[in-house]
Structures are given as C-alpha cells and as structure tokens.
C-alpha cells in the first residue's frame, strides 16, 4: 500500500543545533502513528515542516506518492493536513461558530456553518453548541472547537500535539472514541504525547526521536511504557522517591478565600479554605478553567486578598505584593510558560534575575549583578538539564519542555518555604517529568511545603500526600491520596467532590 505520507531524509538545522537529522517515517491511511521523544528531540520541528510552517534544509516529503512541499499552512491544509496545536488559538469573546469561521479559507454564512458544526459534532460524538461563547467553555470543549474546525476541512492527516494534557479521564475517553472513528474512516493521525499508556491504548505504530534522529520504531500495544520511555531518553529511568513526610508546623493557611476573577471569562474563588504544613505535598486537581489561575494569583500576590484570608508562617500576607511574598519565602510557578513564568524575548539570565534578584542576592544597593545572575542561570541549566546553547539564549528559543524545566528549577533552587506550582510537568517528557517530580519531593523532604496544581492525575497520585479538587472556584476538603483511585479523582475534578470517597 502506498503510504499517505512519506518523509525521507528530512534535515533542519538552526544556529547551534540540528533539530532534525535525516529523519524518515511513513504513515499509512487510517493509521494512528505516535511521534515520541524527549523535550528537544525534534518533534515540533518535524510537524512544523509537515504543516508548512518550516521549510526543510534537505530531504523529501510525499503525499499519496506525489511531491509534497507546503510553503505555508494554507497549502498544507489544501493538501489534506489538519493540525490541533497544544495551545489553543481561540478568541474568548467570540462564539464557537465565529472562531471556526476565522480558521477557514472560505467560510460559509454563519447560519450554514452552525448547521455543519452541529452535524460534525453529532457524527463524531463531540457535543458542542455553535452559539456558545468560547470564554465560557471548559478546556475539553475548547479542544473540540479546534478539532471540529479541522474536521470541517475533511483532512486526510490530522496532527495532534499533546491533546489530552488538560482533559479529565472522562474527556479523554470521548476524544479517543472520536479518533478511533476517524481512523476507521481512513483518516491518518500523527499523535504527539508524553502519556505513554495513552499511546499504548490508541496508537498502531510509533517512531521515536532522540536528539533529532530516529532511534527506533515500535508497536505500542506490544511495548511497555517504560521501554518506550527508555528508548526516548537512552537510559534507564528512575522512580521518584520520598524519604520524609509532613510535619506538624503549619506554614500556610487559607481561610474562606473568596475573590473575583480579574478576567471576564475567569472563575471566581469561593470560600477556599485549607491548611498546609511543613514537608507536605498537597495535590490540587481540577479541569482547566475552574479557578487554578486565580488560586495561584491569590497565593503569588498578583491578586490581593482582604485581611484574614491568607496567613503565611503566622503573618497575614493577603495585602502584600509578589516581591514581598517571595522575599518571605512564598514562591510560585504559573502554568503559562511564555509571557507569565518567563519573558519570551529576554535571555535566560534576565529571566533568572526577574524572580531571583532578592533571594539569590543578585542586586546590591540598587544595582543588578549580572555576573551573579548569569551564574544562577547556569546553575539552573546544569541542575535541571535544560537543553540550550547557553544562558544568553532567549526564553522563546527553548522547547516548551526545556523552558518548563528552567522555570521550575529557577524556583526550586531559591529554597522556598512554600512553593506553589501549576502544571509542573505539562508537555514535559517522561525523564524530565520524573526529574521535576523528584525535585519537588526533595524540596518537601528538606522541610518546604509544596502545592501542586495539576490535571495529570497520575502525577498527583505519585507525589501528593493529600488531594483536593477545585471545581467552579470551590476547593474540596483535602483527603489522603492513599486509598483514592484515579477514577475517583477524575469524578471529583468533574464536580463530584462533595461525595464521600466510598460512594464515588
């Protein structure tokens, strides 16, 4: 059978790095093909060449046995390639139909488009109203908008980048039913994910990249997740371990924290109460858009709170700003890497200075010590294996996973008393995720308290002492993670956290 897509000897180099080195792979019609590799392995560059965002330096691409050289995404879409990106490109203030119309070359009238959206929605089991405002949608519903926008163009190849990173287990099941139906109809799917058990469940074949080269192929259902992970990183993986547990000393207390969201489409916090002790890891799960960003902003000081709602080491800090809180030892790492956790066009040295100035002694008498800042950035790069030519490189030049390692490492190395992290391993490969989780556990072992906000349920089960669910801005009473199943946590994230665990 002639492959739907054939890549032969693709090479793409940038200054200081070869992103893809003689890469070849073949995808058959209807095949669900996984593209695996650690952060910086070259996955993003490869799919960008397929989608017309990047031009290869060498090599050949063929679609249906004919030359395929898309000069831009429009040309790739015209040839039958659709792509659902990891970061959604939607306008919150517009309706579903209006957003989909903006992504079409020749959009029909909105009335006709709405009808087509309903038809595709019903056909592929993706419930979605074309009249709803995107700002009111959950993360899973937003992903459906992106998928339906692609399906309306009847793609022959659908590229999906980390599609389940913000979904509950129940939403993942719906997505996989859709993808299997598309596959049965002959649509090929190129699937990128770090969730290897999902790969084993869904994919027919896998190509593994390491440092820009193809290092192996496998049939996922016949290969263990650990074997695939070790092929990706080229070494034996360790399992994060914990040598200490929570102590009696309370370091952070939230008492009826209620705040409106600063965003018109955000979620207000409603009577959030919790106590955090030294050495404890508290896991907070929730479907995206249920108050995670607002909770982190309230803890970081970006969003102030009235007196009596936030106490840190016995001091009321609700009215203090971020710098004062950081100086006292309350540090945070937000979910959005570029633009919030890091300034895209600033170097890693400058980004290290932004949050480390006070605690790392990077300023003296009002003057910035750039040599010390560079040294701090180099320590982060070395300790967290950040793949970059050096600390002078801009944050935006790093792959998403490597920037995540830098952001987490920057906060961990400042020895916080409390660290709050939102989605610490989002889009990070198995090896890097294990390293980040181990760093958080080591921090707790040293006596720090850690709050991990995550949609990765396996992650929360692995490292958290207690778990609480955030739903519509309300936080459930924390429960010990021992005895909770992933299914129970998934239901709690979906709003069932008022139920007794035995009844879930």
Image (cartoon, rainbow, N blue to C red):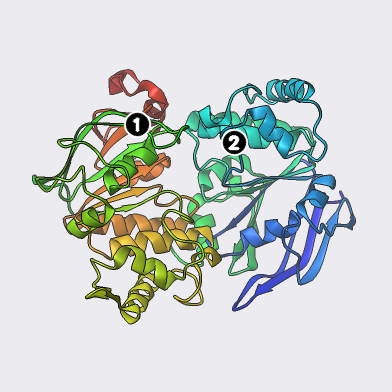
| Viewer-nearest of discs 1 and 2 | 1
Question: Which residue is nearer to you in this view: 116 or 131?
Answer: 131
Question: Which residue is nearer to you in this view: 18 or 367?
Answer: 367
Residue 141, by quadrant, is: top right
Residue 243 rendering spot, x and y as whole percentages: 20, 55
Residue 151, by quadrant, is: top right
The number of numbered badges drawn on the structure is 2
| Residue receiving disc 2 | 143
The reply to whether residue 243 is in sight is no
| Residue receiving disc 1 | 260
- Looking at the image, residue 302 lies above or below residue 124: below
- Looking at the image, residue 131 lies above or below residue 339: above
Q: Is residue 394 left or right of residue 494?
A: right
Q: Is residue 498 left or right of residue 53?
A: left
Residue 113, by quadrant, is: top right
Q: Helix, strand, or loop for circle 2?
A: helix
Give the mark nearer the N terminus: 1 vs 2.
2
User: For residue 278, which numbered disc appears in the image?
Assistant: none
Residue 276 rendering spot, x and y as whole percentages: 18, 42
- Looking at the image, residue 340 lies above or below residue 479: below
The reply to whether residue 284 is in sight is yes
Residue 62 rendering spot, x and y as whole percentages: 85, 57
Mark 1, residues whose alpha carbon is within 10 Å: few (<14), some, or many (≥20)? some
Which residue reaches farthest front?
Answer: 366
Q: Is residue 364 left or right of residue 149?
A: left
* Residue drawn at point x = 79 percent, y = 65 percent: 8
Q: From the image, which quarter does the C terminus lie in?
A: top left
Mark 2, residues whose alpha carbon is within 10 Å: few (<14), some, or many (≥20)? many
- Looking at the image, residue 486 lies above or below residue 409: above
> Spatial distance from mark 1 to mark 2, Cα to Cα?
26 Å
Q: Is residue 480 left or right of residue 106?
A: left
């Amino acid at each position: 059978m002639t492959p739907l897509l054939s890549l032969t000897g693709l090479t793409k180099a940038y200054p200081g790095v070869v992103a893809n080195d003689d890469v070849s792979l073949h995808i058959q019609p209807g095949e669900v093909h996984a593209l695996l590799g650690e952060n910086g392995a070259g996955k993003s560059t490869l799919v960008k060449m397929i989608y017309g965002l990047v031009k290869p330096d060498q090599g050949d691409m063929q679609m249906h046995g004919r030359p395929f050289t898309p000069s831009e995404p429009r040309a790739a879409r015209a040839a039958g390639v659709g792509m659902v990106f990891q970061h959604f490109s939607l306008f919150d203030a517009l309706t579903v139909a209006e957003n989909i119309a903006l992504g079409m070359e020749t959009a029909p009238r909105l009335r006709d488009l709405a009808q087509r959206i309903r038809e595709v929605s019903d056909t592929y089991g993706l419930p979605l109203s074309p009249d709803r405002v995107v700002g009111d949608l959950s993360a899973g519903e937003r992903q459906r908008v992106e998928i339906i926008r692609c399906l309306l163009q009847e793609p022959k190849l659908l590229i999906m980048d980390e599609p389940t990173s913000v979904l509950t287990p129940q939403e993942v099941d719906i997505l996989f039913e859709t993808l299997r139906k598309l596959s049965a109809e002959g649509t090929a799917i190129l699937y990128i994910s770090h969730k290897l058990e999902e790969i084993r469940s869904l994919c027919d074949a896998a190509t593994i990249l390491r440092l820009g080269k193809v290092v192996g192929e496998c049939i996922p259902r016949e290969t263990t997740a650990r074997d695939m992970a070790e092929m990706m990183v080229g070494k034996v993986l360790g399992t994060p371990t914990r040598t200490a547990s929570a102590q009696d000393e309370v370091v952070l207390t939230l008492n009826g924290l209620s705040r409106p969201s600063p965003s018109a489409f955000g979620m207000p916090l409603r009577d959030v109460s919790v106590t955090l002790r030294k050495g404890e890891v508290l896991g907070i799960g929730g479907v995206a858009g249920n108050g995670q960003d607002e909770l982190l902003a309230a803890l970081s000081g970006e969003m102030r709170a009235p007196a009596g709602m936030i106490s840190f080491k016995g001091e009321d800090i609700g009215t203090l700003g971020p710098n004062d809180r950081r100086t006292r030892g309350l540090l945070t790492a937000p979910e959005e890497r570029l633009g919030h956790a890091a300034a895209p066009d600033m170097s890693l040295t400058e980004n290290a200075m932004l949050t480390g100035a006070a605690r790392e002694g990077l300023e003296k008498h009002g003057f910035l010590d750039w040599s010390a800042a560079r040294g701090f950035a180099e320590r982060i790069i070395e300790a967290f294996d950040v793949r970059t030519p050096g600390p002078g490189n801009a944050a935006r030049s790093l792959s998403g996973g490597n920037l995540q390692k830098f952001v987490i490492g920057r906060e961990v190395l400042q020895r916080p008393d409390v660290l709050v992290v939102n989605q610490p391993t989002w889009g990070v490969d198995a090896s890097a995720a294990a390293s980040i989780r181990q760093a958080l556990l080591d921090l707790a072992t040293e006596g720090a308290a850690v709050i991990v906000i995550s949609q990765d349920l396996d992650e929360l089960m692995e490292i958290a002492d207690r778990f609480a669910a955030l739903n519509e801005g309300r936080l459930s009473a924390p429960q010990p993670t021992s005895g909770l199943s992933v299914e129970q946590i998934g239901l709690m994230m979906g709003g069932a956290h008022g139920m007794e665990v035995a009844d879930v």
